[in-house]
Image (cartoon, helix red, strand yellow):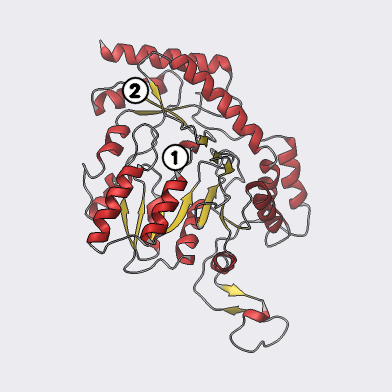
Amino acid sequence: MIPYGKQSIDQLDIDAVIDVLQSDWLTQGPKVPEFEQKLCSYTGADRAVAVNSATSALHIACLALGVGNGDIVWTSPNSFVASSNCALYCGASVDFVDIDIDTGNMSIEALTSKLVHAERQNQLPRVLIPVHFAGQSCDMQAINELAQQYGFKVIEDASHAIGGSFDGKKIGSCEYSDICVFSFHPVKIMTSAEGGAALTNNPQLADTMVKLRSHGITNKPEEFSEPSHGAWYYQQNVLGFNYRMTDLHAALGCQQLTKVDRFVQQRNKIAARYDSLFKNSGIQPLLVTNTSRSAYHLYVVKAPLHSPEEHKKLIQNLRKAGIFAHVHYIPIYLQPFYKQLGFSAGYCPSAELYYHQAVTLPLFPALSEEQVQHIVDTLKSLVAKLSV
């Protein structure tokens, strides 16, 4: 079975983890701050806060921006549930902005229209979380202009997108956002096994997130609200969480980060091969705009299908043929939990139309040209049979 995603691990990665296992520090040691500094050097952001997952990073990012009861957070329905769950963790409500069916990213037109209506209803979001779907940046300049106009904060969910760029700047630079979040899950561009990070150019936000990732505790005397009891003393000043990244994970992250540009180059090369093989086939790859360089976490095509049943059958037949095709994503609000919150089918028509056509094909650096050819030939054949 050809998987849709796969980590790329070499001996240098293995050696980096072994070095930590043989050191005095398995966690709360020097590797996490080293990884954070390397993330800053790579992206151009001022601060990075490494945590145990992108979900944790999204949660503390929302909290750092003051999200709480009575607030509204908007995000894309075309994402994993963590992109919206993070708002609910904070006691806020969540809403969704429809997508551009050609890119899979948040539609600027839909966002602008929704903001106009929300302002009239006094229901503007406190935070917007655009999702850089499949590795391609949303139009962050347009989003930033709307943020300035309507007064909301921006958290980039760049879980798919480390190594990509927008308008010539690395995703993660926070040029147009308050905070940017990365994921280091094994199927992503680079991995720390499990892990995530929140990057920002705001030192106050960074300091708050540092406290939140470790129980809300500080051992810095200048941050104490009461006198120290001695050298062992620490204080909990806010309600935090155990979201720390270990040194083992950070060591792998440091080593993987040195290869991100190569991984992205390889992924772009494979995507270009796919693109050329799908020309004039009726099977449409997602559009990559001329302002973006996609990190290509995913390679997604829209198949010319006529029903959800055809979609289901196509995915099943690809898997029977040894190709682990996937679908990214079920619109979040169609999940049973979100239906309980009042959402229903038809809420974001473009996201639903996209969902019933989308096919995620295998993409990872070790994927061979022969495998790509086999995947394309198989998909074309199966689509043709469905059309008969």
In the visual, does 253 lie left or right of 20?
left
Residue 181 locus on image (x, y percent): 52, 52
Q: Nearer the viewer, residue 249 or 181?
A: 181
Q: Quadrant of the C terminus?
A: top left
In the rendered image, residue 382, in percent from the top left (x then y), is placed at 35, 15
Mark 2, secondary structure of its residue: loop
Q: Quadrant of residue 212?
A: bottom right
The picture quadrant where one finds residue 334 is top left
Q: Are marks 2 and 1 in contact (CB under 8 Å)?
A: no
- Name the mark on residue 133: 1
Disc 2 residue crowd, few under 14, some 14–19, many 20+, Cα 10 Å: many
Q: Earlier in the sequence, mark 2 or mark 1?
A: 1
Amino acid type, mark 1: Phe
Disc 2 residue type (three-letter): Ala
Q: Is residue 13 above or below residue 243?
A: above
Which residue is painted at 49% across and 66% down in the image?
64
Which structural element holds mark 1?
A: helix
Q: Quadrant of residue 266?
A: top right
Callout 1: few (<14), some (14-19), or many (20+) C-alpha neighbours within 10 Å? many
Question: Is residue 365 visible to the viewer in this orientation of the structure?
Answer: no
Q: Is residue 374 left or right of residue 112?
A: right
The mark total stands at 2
Where's residue 12, x and y in %?
75, 38
Is residue 296 something one can see in this rendering? yes
Which x, y percent locates residue 313? 30, 23
Q: Is residue 335 above or below residue 241?
A: above
Above or below for 90 versus 140: below
- Residue at the image point whose x is 66% and y is 87% from the top: 228
At 31% from the left and 33% from the top, the residue drawn is 354
For label 2, the residue is: 303
